[in-house]
Amino acid sequence: MTRRSGLGVLGRRLLAAFMVVATASVGVFAFVAVMGLDLEVNAERLRVQQDIASHTAATAAVVYRQAGGWAEADLDHAYAVADGAGASLVVTDASGDVVAQQGVSEQHSGPVSPTRAIDHPVIVDGERVGTVSLSFKRPATSALSRSSIGWLLGAAVVALGLAAVVAVLMARQITRPVTQISEVGRRFAAGDHAARAHVEATGEIGELARTMNDAADAVLAAEQARLNIAADVAHELRTPLAALQAGLEEMRDGLMPADPAALGRLHDQATRMGRVVGELAALSSAEAAPRVTDSTRIVDLAAVAEAEMASRQSHMHCAGLELVGDLHSTLVRADEDRLHEIIGNLLANAAQYCRAGDHVAVTVRQQDDRAMLQVSDTGPGIPADELPHVFERFWRGSRESGTAGSGLGLAIVRALVTAYDGNVTVASTPGAGAVFSIDLPVARPVGVIHSGV
């Protein structure tokens, strides 16, 4: 499989996003820098112009003192100062009448912006005798501004270039783990079930890699479970099927008479196969059971347990078992038939492994917001190493001792209890019996309540 080079769709989108942010950032910085520079240049220009106005006023004051007034004052030097600064000059006396004015020479003509007038008083011997007013005309764009703007534009281009390089590197760094995870997914889908994502990353990408690996492990576990189920089903059906086939062949060949006893044995084998198939169907249905919904009916768990105990009382009595109950009304939201199946399988399991004279007790009570159901017995108990397996399909363990059963009943119980957001556990001490405990959510006392009897 060829590895794609360059940036993928995600990488290109990340690169575009980085470049948009970088361009906007550089643009804002350049704009702020130009505006700041312009303000600084204008402030410096204003200071210089104020100095020129002060110098012009001082020059006018000197000639005023020498001439004894404005009438004979020679303002040529003041004109020269103003003209050298590119400003027009207007001189007024103390009453505000214009006594002299001078325009800008032709050498300062050209594109100009609006004028700026700066007034400065003419002080002679501590008395204001007039005012000089300079109107400055500056070029629209100074050489300093043009060079500064050019420098800023060059710096912006360099910054954008560096940002592009960094953005490409970052996009590759971010998308590389995603690309590796995608490659692992393609390899796994192609049949390489050992493929795993080995990504040294934290955060969401690391979590994605771990989730990918967990999903791959779950798929393998499900596939192994499917193979195990197929093998278990074949094993469970092989013995009765072989016995049935052998018996029929012996009858066909005349080696065994087709009397009621022989036919009864063959019928028992066929019944055993039918029971296995039926319980497999029940387990499949239980595992596919929908979760509790608002439309599920509310039933009294104690009433269902009482009805199920009554239906099995004669069977328990024939087996030499004493069945007792401690039942307190507790409402749950579930399917009544499913509850009968749960309790019935637990009672059947107890009857299968208990000895004559043992006791089987069923308890129903409410604890906080959970409905508690317990089925306990005084039978031989379950070895500690077998406890983790009792809810697995086809598990019968060392307690089998010749007892019949498919090993699916407790698996059905677990599937049904899980479907109703419940939990099922088992505790046992060898020689002292076993206790199967189920807890289900307590239902709100609304809707129709069924007795279960």
Image (cartoon, rainbow, N blue to C red):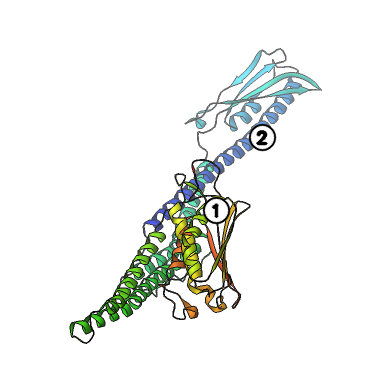
Q: Secondary structure at mark 1?
A: helix
Please say if 392 is above or below 24.
Answer: below
Q: Which mark is residue 388?
A: none
Residue at x 65%, y 27% (from the top left corner): 78
Specify the quadrant of the image occupied by residue 10: bottom left
Q: Position of residue 409 (x, y in %)?
A: 44, 67
Quadrant where the image shows the N terminus: bottom left
Q: Is residue 414 visible?
A: no
Q: Is residue 118 visible?
A: yes
Residue at x 73%, y 21% (from the top left corner): 64
Q: Position of residue 335 (x, y in %)?
A: 45, 51
Residue tagged 1: 302
Q: Nearer the viewer, residue 261 or 243?
A: 261
**Which sits earlier in the primary sequence, circle 2 or circle 1?**
2
Residue tagged 2: 47
How many marks the image carries: the answer is 2
Please say if 211 is above or below 125.
Answer: below
